[in-house]
């Protein structure tokens, strides 16, 4: 085995005839051209190919196709599955999320998920090594060293190679059932590869990569949400979502690092009637693979409890932790490239010091290393305590935490009215950065911490993210901070959405107006405002009602304010004038609808076409837009139900202010083909199928996917399908070659050339 368990060849395990693997054929026939048998064959090839490409990307980090090609394969798979009702539980398409649940259930772990004893002192690590050798009568001990991930520990069970269940660590004995949420994680395979045990239960760590975390936080800020404090909290909160579609939208990833339990029918003697301690119940539950997952895992748990171990001795490659890590990629499970096997404890200490040196360069958070006795038989001899594994130890990095005192707690008001408590601190160095304020997140968090002014607290700063109060270490006050019942800026009542507090003042609240004005001008690319200038304009009363007031500001009056002059005032006037009649998408983003950032706003603009259509739509209509789910649709409807928001929009539409936003590029419409129905088969050079359909629909025709007696023309391109041509012959439908089709359109007055 190599020094790194990810030094592997990419095993094939795909059909040699699969057209979607090394050089995928992306020129798909229209799905309506497929019959049932062809659809089933294509779906099987696509599933096999998508799983293969997932393996190359997530496990081997060596993709063989471009991202765009992968996306096309995935979308085609979903399209064919939906059209022919061929969805299955472990299809790659299930990663988009399932139905929401009312609450997360709990399940018992197959094998207890214990903690690991730890220290940041090298002498404690050497003491651990001495205890291990003493218990093993002085035997030589080899260690496996791994990064200690700062994520969320997870148990995942596979039965007959299929993903069946996932649970959080919980209290070690039971955890929350997060099966559907973990299913959405792209690095968690729905089917194992290669020669795997019949039942396999593994332990991994769910995390969010640093770069993905920063990008996702930027998206949250763009749509008016507060950023997450750190990747670990974001991962934990995401995994416990009641709606798997929310989990699917967030960039979770997973490393695997332990086999908790494994059972194989052949290794246990189930195929030839052999006997083994604790195996009878598992063999009976297995029954050739027909057992329910719950029955089989219950039997395996009983077997593991009886034998103090969860792995069949007869399963090849699971005799050491190092070999175990080596098998993971063969099964399609992602491991960490920095895992290493070392000869002694001093080498393990050196490994930790080396990893600490590159910690900031890694794309995932770690807080130390984990050392494990390599030999499984030695691990069995060492055993466990009620809380810890005796064969593993965590050698932690110095904490990026410090203790200081809360000098005050202030409540900030965000653009959407969210009230965020912030602890003002006696300045302290945390991870090389001076920290004088830290988030307390929300009123519920304050109560859980029991934090108040004067208390001594531990501040944590995980990576390059927002410092937050981790715990109270010295209580010097009575109770916890009393969260205000009214907004500290405008005095409006405070309302709650779960644990989150909101000011009800809207734009009547100066704090919200400042943020709204700053955001509005930023989205519309109006230079010369920014947060400081927005605050000044509000404080001076030049912007007092809503963001539309910015267009009514008198340049001469503005020039007289501190920090302004005639030139800067005139520059702002020109910037505002240049921003008139913005694209509809920019307008919808700028007005500050919660959770509607530039991307969603552009989708809304494209879908509705003009502002009036958007404003007059029913709440259900918003969900018809790609990227808009029930939550965002609810925010849009609530925003537009507010009379004040409607008034702001109408004020902005006035030509003396922003003016009417520009609709997306107008689509030329006509009736030259009114009443006719077209069907297309095969490819038309220089045109996509959607383009030619849109062309005829623009001029009054219908474009359908199947030929019937109502069809007027079948346009036959290159490599056409036979089904549509047979149907055209049956219904006496005229066929047109592409050149004849375009010539006919030109004769009827349809401008074809400008659309090419």
Image (cartoon, helix red, strand yellow):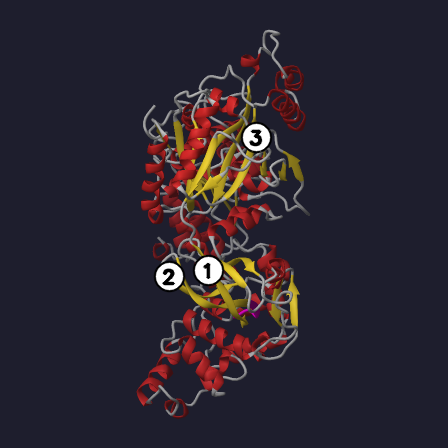
When the figure is inspected, residue 89 is found, relative to residue 310, above or below; the finding is below
When the figure is inspected, residue 192 is found, relative to residue 82, above or below; the finding is above
Report x, y in % for residue 569. Answer: 36, 86
Gap in Å between the C-alphas at discs 2 and 3?
42 Å
* Residue nearer the viewer, 418 or 545: 418
Residue matched to label 3:
157
Gap in Å between the C-alphas at discs 2 and 1?
10 Å
Give the side of residue 155 with respect to residue 756, left or right: right
Q: Which mark is residue 96?
A: none
Give the side of residue 481 with respect to residue 46, left or right: right
**Cβ atoms at labels 2 and 1 below 8 Å apart:** yes
Secondary-structure class at tag 3: strand
Residue matched to label 1:
467
Front of the two marks 1 and 3? 1
The residue at the point 32 percent across, 26 percent down is: 2
Q: Is residue 416 magenta?
A: yes
Q: Could you tell me if residue 31 is visible in this image?
A: no
**Cβ atoms at labels 2 and 3 below 8 Å apart:** no
């Amino acid at each position: 085995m190599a020094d790194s368990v990810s030094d592997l060849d990419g095993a094939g395990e795909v059909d040699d005839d699969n057209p979607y693997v090394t050089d995928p054929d992306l020129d798909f026939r229209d799905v309506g051209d497929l019959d049932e048998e062809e659809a089933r064959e294509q779906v099987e090839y696509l599933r096999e190919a998508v799983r293969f490409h997932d393996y190359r990307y997530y496990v081997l980090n060596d993709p063989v196709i471009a991202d765009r090609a992968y996306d096309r394969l995935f979308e085609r798979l979903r399209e064919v599955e939906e059209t022919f009702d061929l969805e299955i539980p472990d299809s790659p398409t299930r990663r988009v999320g399932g139905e929401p649940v009312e609450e997360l259930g709990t399940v018992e772990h197959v094998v207890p998920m214990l903690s690991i004893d730890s220290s940041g002192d090298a002498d404690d690590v050497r003491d651990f090594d001495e205890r291990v050798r003493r218990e093993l009568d002085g035997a030589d001990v080899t260690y496996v060293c791994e990064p200690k991930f700062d994520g969320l520990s997870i148990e995942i069970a596979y039965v007959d190679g299929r993903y069946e269940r996932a649970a959080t660590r919980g209290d070690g004995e039971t955890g929350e059932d997060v099966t559907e949420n973990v299913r959405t994680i792209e690095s968690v395979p729905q089917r194992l590869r290669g020669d795997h045990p019949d039942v396999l239960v593994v332990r991994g760590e769910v995390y969010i990569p640093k770069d993905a975390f920063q990008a996702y936080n930027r998206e949250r800020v763009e749509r008016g949400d507060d950023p997450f404090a750190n990747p670990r909290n974001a991962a934990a909160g995401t995994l416990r979502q009641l709606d798997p579609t929310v989990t699917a939208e967030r960039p979770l990833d997973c490393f695997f690092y332990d086999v908790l339990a494994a059972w194989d029918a052949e290794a246990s003697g189930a195929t030839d009637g052999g006997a083994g301690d604790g195996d009878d119940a598992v063999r009976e539950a297995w029954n050739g693979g027909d057992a329910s997952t719950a029955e089989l895992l219950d039997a395996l748990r009983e077997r593991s409890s009886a034998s103090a171990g969860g792995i069949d001795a007869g399963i090849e490659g699971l005799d050491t932790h190092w070999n175990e890590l080596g098998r993971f990629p063969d099964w399609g499970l992602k491991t960490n490239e920095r895992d290493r096997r070392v000869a002694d404890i001093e080498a393990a200490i050196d490994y930790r010091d080396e990893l600490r040196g590159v910690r900031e360069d890694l794309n995932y958070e770690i807080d130390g290393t984990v050392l494990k006795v390599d030999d499984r038989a030695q691990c069995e001899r060492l055993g466990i305590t009620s809380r810890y594994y005796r064969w593993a130890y965590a050698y932690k990095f110095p904490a990026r935490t410090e203790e200081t005192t809360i000098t005050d707690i202030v409540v900030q008001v965000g653009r959407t009215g969210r009230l965020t408590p912030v602890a003002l601190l006696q300045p302290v160095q945390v991870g090389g950065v001076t920290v004088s304020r830290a988030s307390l997140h929300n009123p519920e968090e304050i109560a859980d911490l029991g934090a108040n002014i004067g208390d001594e607290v531990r501040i944590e700063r995980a990576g390059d993210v927002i410092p937050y109060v981790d715990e109270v270490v010295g209580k010097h006050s009575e109770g916890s901070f009393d969260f205000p019942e009214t907004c500290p800026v405008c005095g409006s009542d405070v309302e709650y959405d779960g644990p989150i507090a909101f000011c009800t003042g809207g734009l009547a609240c100066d704090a919200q107006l400042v943020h709204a004005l700053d955001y509005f001008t930023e989205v519309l690319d109006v230079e010369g405002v920014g947060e400081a200038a927005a605050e000044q304009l509000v404080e001076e009363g030049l912007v007092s009602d809503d963001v539309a007031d910015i267009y009514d500001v008198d340049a001469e009056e503005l020039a007289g304010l501190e920090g302004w002059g005639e030139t800067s005032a005139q520059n702002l006037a020109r910037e505002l004038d240049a921003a008139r009649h913005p694209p509809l998408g920019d307008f919808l983003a700028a007005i500050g609808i919660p959770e509607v950032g530039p991307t969603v706003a552009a989708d809304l603009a494209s879908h509705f076409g003009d502002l009036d259509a958007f404003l007059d739509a029913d709440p259900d209509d918003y969900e018809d837009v790609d990227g808009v789910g029930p939550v965002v649709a609810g925010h849009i409807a609530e925003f537009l139900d507010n009379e004040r928001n409607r008034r702001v929009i109408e004020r902005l539409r006035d030509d003396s202010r922003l003016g009417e936003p520009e609709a997306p590029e107008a689509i030329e419409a006509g009736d030259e083909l009114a009443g006719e129905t077209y069907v297309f088969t095969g490819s038309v050079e220089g045109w996509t199928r959607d383009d030619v359909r849109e062309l005829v629909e623009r001029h009054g025709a219908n474009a359908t996917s199947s030929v019937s007696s109502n069809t007027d023309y079948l346009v036959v391109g290159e490599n056409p399908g036979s089904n549509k041509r047979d149907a055209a012959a049956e219904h006496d439908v005229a066929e047109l070659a592409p050149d004849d089709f375009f010539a006919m359109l030109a004769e009827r007055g349809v401008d074809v050339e400008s659309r090419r």
